């Protein structure tokens, strides 16, 4: 708590008159001021990020602490940017969720108890880079909070999982398996399949493929070995009779 100015017009700073009453208050004031120099966690805003959503190793961010510093007279001093802060990515081995911070994001930054600069540089166990403790320089960005409504997201709810993108969704793998016990519904103006389309039905007694609409192809249609465009008919006789089955 800031004490009022004394009769000389000079602020007393953080030292109140009661802080000098007895040994306990003197020690408490000293300890409190030491603790005030320890950085633990705070809310920051992302100024810059070394990565922008690409398939790259985890990068670093520049952050700006959003809670101002206050001096003994109650005057605010904004923080300056803290550079080269490692940020958290959900990753195990070569498996990761790539979601890099973007400028303007608000999130939480925590600060290590010792200098982490050597570990940041070498990615290996080592001694602290200096004797500093709980410093702004040893921050680690853990992720976002207090941010707005997303337009691209994976939503988990009681109704199921919703994957939404205003641009595109790409699945890349040697094999993509979809196991749906009820149905797979695709609603789109056009659908393009590059490669062989193999439709199989586990119940051979039922119709394996039902298409409601016209089928257009630039090539031939082969049904049980019979060509639609070049098959011939048996039992052809002049007149108005019907031909035999295709050969």
Image (cartoon, grey):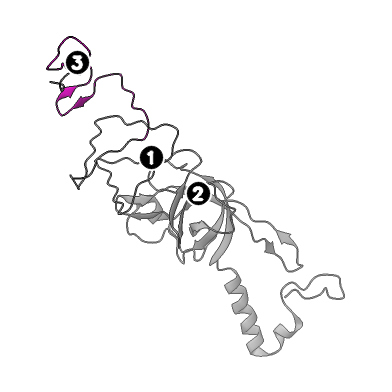
* Mark linked to residue 170: 1
Residue assigned mark 2: 101
Among the two numbered marks 1 and 2 on one chain, the one whose residue lies closer to the N terminus: 2
* Left or right relative to 21: residue 133: left
Nearer to me, 31 or 177: 177
Residue 119 quadrant: bottom left
The magenta stretch is 212-241
* Helix, strand or loop for disc 3: loop
* Helix, strand or loop for disc 2: loop
Q: Around disc 3, counting alpha carbons within 10 Å, would you say few (fewer than 14), some (14 to 19), or many (20 or more)?
A: few
Query: Residue 16: image x %, image y %?
Result: 74, 79
Query: Residue 2: image x %, image y %?
Result: 75, 73
Q: Residue at x 50, y 63 (%)?
A: 111
In three-dimensional space, the C-alpha distance between marks 3 and 1, rounded to whole angstroms, equals: 40 Å
Nearer to me, 220 or 63: 220
In three-dimensional space, the C-alpha distance between marks 2 and 3, rounded to whole angstroms, equals: 61 Å
Q: Around disc 1, counting alpha carbons within 10 Å, would you say few (fewer than 14), some (14 to 19), or many (20 or more)?
A: few
Among the two numbered marks 2 and 3 on one chain, the one whose residue lies closer to the N terminus: 2
Q: Is 6 drawn above or below residue 64 in the view shown? A: below
Dots 1, 2 in contact, CB < 8 A: no
* Left or right relative to 27: residue 21: right
* Left or right relative to 79: residue 226: left
Residue 53 quadrant: top left
Q: Is 42 drawn above or below residue 232 in the view shown? A: below
Residue assigned mark 3: 230
């Amino acid at each position: 708590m800031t004490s009022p100015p004394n009769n000389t017009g000079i602020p007393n700073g953080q030292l109140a008159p009661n802080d000098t009453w007895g040994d306990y208050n003197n020690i408490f004031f000293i300890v409190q001021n030491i603790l005030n120099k320890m950085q633990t966690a705070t809310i920051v805003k992302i100024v810059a990020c070394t990565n922008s959503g690409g398939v790259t190793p985890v990068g670093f961010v520049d952050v700006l602490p959003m809670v101002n510093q206050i001096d003994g007279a109650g005057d605010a001093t904004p923080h300056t940017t803290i550079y080269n802060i490692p940020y958290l990515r959900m990753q195990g081995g070569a498996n990761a969720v790539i979601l890099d911070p973007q400028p303007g994001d608000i999130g939480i930054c925590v600060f290590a108890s010792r200098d982490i600069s050597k570990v940041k540089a070498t990615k290996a166990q080592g001694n602290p880079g200096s004797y500093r403790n709980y410093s702004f320089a040893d921050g680690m960005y853990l992720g976002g909070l207090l941010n707005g409504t997303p337009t691209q997201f994976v939503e988990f709810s009681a109704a199921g999982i919703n994957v939404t993108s205003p641009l595109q969704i790409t699945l890349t793998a040697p094999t993509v398996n979809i196991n749906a016990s009820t149905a797979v519904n695709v609603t789109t103006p056009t659908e393009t399949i590059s490669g062989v389309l193999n439709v199989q039905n586990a119940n051979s007694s039922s119709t394996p493929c039902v298409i409601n609409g016209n089928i257009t192809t630039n090539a031939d249609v082969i049904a049980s070995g019979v060509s639609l465009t070049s098959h011939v008919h048996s039992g052809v006789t002049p007149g108005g009779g019907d031909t035999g089955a295709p050969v």
